Image: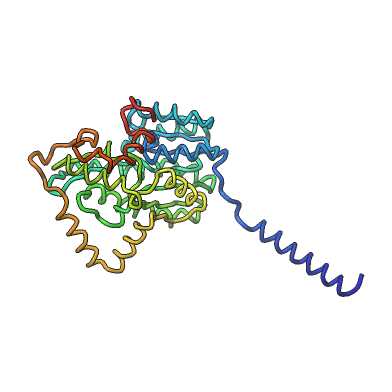
Amino acid sequence: MSVRRKALAALATGVSCALTVRALRRPRRYELAGRTVLITGGSRGLGLALAREAAAQCARVAICGRDPASLERARAVLLRSGAAIAAFTCDVSDRAEVEQLIAAVQQRFGAIDMLINNAGVIEVGPASVMSIDEFDEAMRTNFWGVLFPTLAVLPDMRARRIGRIVNITSIGGRISVPHLLPYCTSKFAAVGLSQGFGVELAAEGIRVTTVCPGLMMTGSPRNAIFMGKHRAEYAWFSIADSLPGLSVNARTAARRILEAAKRGDPELRFPLTTEAVVVVSALAPRLTASILRVINRLLPGPGRRPSARYRGAEAESWISPSWLTRAGERAALRYNQTDGREKV
């Protein structure tokens, strides 16, 4: 063999070895197949969309919720995927119930590989109608309901030095939106908690992803709480939740969230309007505050019975449901937001 050929062969061997070493050093892609995923608030809305997507990726999926009827409907839907599914009744604001949930999931499926803290409540209305009870309700579910499951799964994840935790927060955890004060307060707290855990747990092999989405077409307004002029509040909220471009498809959202979790991304914000609002708020806080004040003036007042609470399904009017909310109504059927009489 000539010197030239020997040199080319040596070069090829060196390149091959370098590529092999690089491939060996590259971390393996985190896949969900064969792993256990626990989703709180998984019986409807985004939680159900996430459960469907995780099941489609061959994960073992455990969901929890407070309402046994909606939980059973969700379990029946998920079983059609052929994946291993388990459903548990649990109030994530109760630490004892959460610890029992984690133990039950581990007994059924083994170690929990991914925890998705998705359970949440929304109260809509002007700040003047919100009492301490509304703030307490929001904090118990949207903050403590994130902390309790996280603390419960951490010992095992730390022992194995691997795990994924996904915290579904909101654009409301970045900017305080008018007429959503208890919700936004609790989501700001959840964002801070999630980011802090993300920084401290990374060294232990645990990746935490903070998800800050805008509106999603999940049909969630039907089960939100409305106060003040409840019919008017429900109308603007449900219409905004149904508008293409402003609200993102739940299935698309679920896929993006799981992909970000598998990559171990520290944060995910979507759609583009959400990203733009966060950037503008950071660069021009005075302008942002002025715009929000204008929006607040356009929203309904306290009404005659300001402290009365109504579920969205009890606050319908001539404008909602209507053609403006058609996409949201379809999403409510698909994501188990109804009472079960319609097909999910």
Residue 227, percent from left and from top: 16, 41
> Which residue occupies the foreground of this view, 48 or 60?
48
Quadrant of residue 270 within the rendered picture? bottom left
> Which residue occupies the foreground of this view, 107 or 327?
327
- Residue found at the very far right of the displayed protein: 1
- Residue at image position (35%, 52%) is 245
Residue 67, percent from left and from top: 33, 29
The correct choice, above or below, for 78 with respect to 5 in the image is above
Which quadrant holds the N terminus?
bottom right
The correct choice, above or below, for 43 with respect to 184 in the image is above
- Residue found at the very far bottom of the displayed protein: 3
The correct choice, above or below, for 192 with respect to 71 in the image is below
Residue 267, percent from left and from top: 42, 56
Can residue 140 be seen in the rendering of this structure? no
Quadrant of residue 284 within the rendered picture? bottom left
> Which residue occupies the foreground of this view, 27 or 240?
240
Quadrant of residue 242 within the rendered picture? top left
Which quadrant holds the C terminus?
top left
Left or right, 25 with reference to 316: right
How does the figure colour the protein chain or chains? rainbow
Left or right, 201 with reference to 67: right
Residue 147, percent from left and from top: 36, 45
Can residue 243 be seen in the rendering of this structure? yes
